[in-house]
């Protein structure tokens, strides 16, 4: 997934913006701060379906709560990415998930038969701090390639050869890590890089719709 067709990326985002977004059915709470112990919540198979630019500036959509992740961060474990993943892989039911909140990072792990898909959101204090964190991640990542043009939706972004996509928007750094999955999967043999990218844009569309 070294290059993404600009038109397809634009059309995909336009379609996503029409679908509406909602947060996860459950919530995670834990004392905030780097030394805070992680709190985790397991979510079973869901039966219902509901619901960056460089430089300093505004805070992220859905400001972090004092005792846990923001509403926007919770969206990574919500219906939209879950439904998208279920549709892409043609799953018989929604995947089981476990989520936790620690060190200002909300993590949602999707347990699939082929391995784990991990989506995380780092909530920085402001946009500048998020960009610094993003730049550090990119410099440390192995085989990182910038996602450019319309494919990055106007945000700093990169992907790695092993199946991760990372975007920075406002005070958030979003990472979709599919590195534990096979190179291709699902009935259409989608690459794990393409899967990570599609789930990233699904979440970003939710954040754009609910700033």
Image: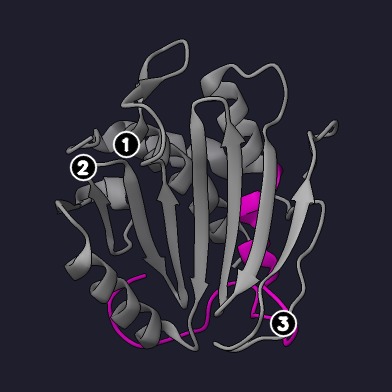
Verify whether residue 78 appears in magenta: yes
Residue farthest along the right direction in this orientation? 47
> Residue placed at 54% from the left, 51% from the top?
203
Label 2 neighbour load within 10 Å: few <14, some 14-19, many 20+:
some
Residue highlighted by disc 3: 65
Ranked by sequence position, the earlier of labels 2 and 1 is 2
Whole-angstrom CA distance, mark 2 to mark 1, is 8 Å
CB atoms of marks 2 and 3 within 8 Å: no
From the image, which quarter does the C terminus lie in? bottom right
Q: Which mark is residue 161?
A: 2
Overall secondary structure of the magenta stretch? loop
Residue at position x 31%, y 59% in the image:
154
Q: Residues within 10 Å of mark 3 (few under 14, many from 20)?
A: few
Q: Are circles 3 and 1 on residues that touch, CB within 8 Å?
A: no
Mark 3 → mark 1, Cα distance in angstroms = 32 Å
Q: Residue sitting at 38 percent across and 67 percent down?
A: 168
Look at the image and give the residue range highlighted in magenta.
Answer: 52-79
Q: Which residue is mark 1?
A: 193
Q: SS at mark 2?
A: loop
Q: Helix, strand or loop at disc 3?
A: loop
- Residues at marks 2 and 1 touching, judged by CB atoms closer than 8 Å: yes
- In this rendering, the label closer to the viewer, 2 or 3: 2
Alpha-carbon span between mark 2 and mark 3: 34 Å
Of pointers 3 and 1, the one earlier in the residue sequence: 3
Which residue shows up at 40% across the image and 39% down it? 180
Which picture quadrant has residue 151? top left
């Amino acid at each position: 997934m070294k290059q993404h067709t600009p038109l397809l990326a634009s059309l995909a985002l336009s379609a996503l913006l029409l679908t509406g977004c909602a947060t996860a059915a459950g919530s995670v709470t834990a004392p905030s701060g780097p030394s805070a112990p992680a709190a985790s919540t397991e979510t079973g198979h869901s039966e219902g379906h509901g619901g960056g630019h460089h430089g300093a500036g505004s805070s992220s959509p859905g400001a972090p709560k004092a005792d846990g992740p923001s509403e926007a961060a919770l969206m990574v474990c919500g219906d939209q990415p879950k439904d998208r993943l279920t549709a892409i892989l043609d799953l018989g039911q929604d995947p089981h998930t476990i989520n936790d909140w620690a060190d200002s990072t909300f993590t949602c792990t999707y347990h699939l038969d082929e391995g784990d898909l991990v989506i995380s959101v780092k909530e920085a204090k402001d946009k500048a701090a998020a960009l610094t964190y993003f730049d550090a991640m990119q410099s440390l990542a192995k085989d990182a390639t910038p996602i450019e043009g319309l494919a990055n939706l106007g945000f700093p972004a990169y992907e790695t050869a092993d199946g991760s996509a990372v975007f920075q928007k406002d005070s958030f750094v979003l990472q979709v890590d599919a590195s534990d999955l096979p190179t291709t999967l699902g009935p259409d043999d989608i690459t794990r890089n393409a899967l990570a990218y599609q789930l990233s844009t699904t979440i970003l569309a939710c954040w754009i719709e609910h700033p």
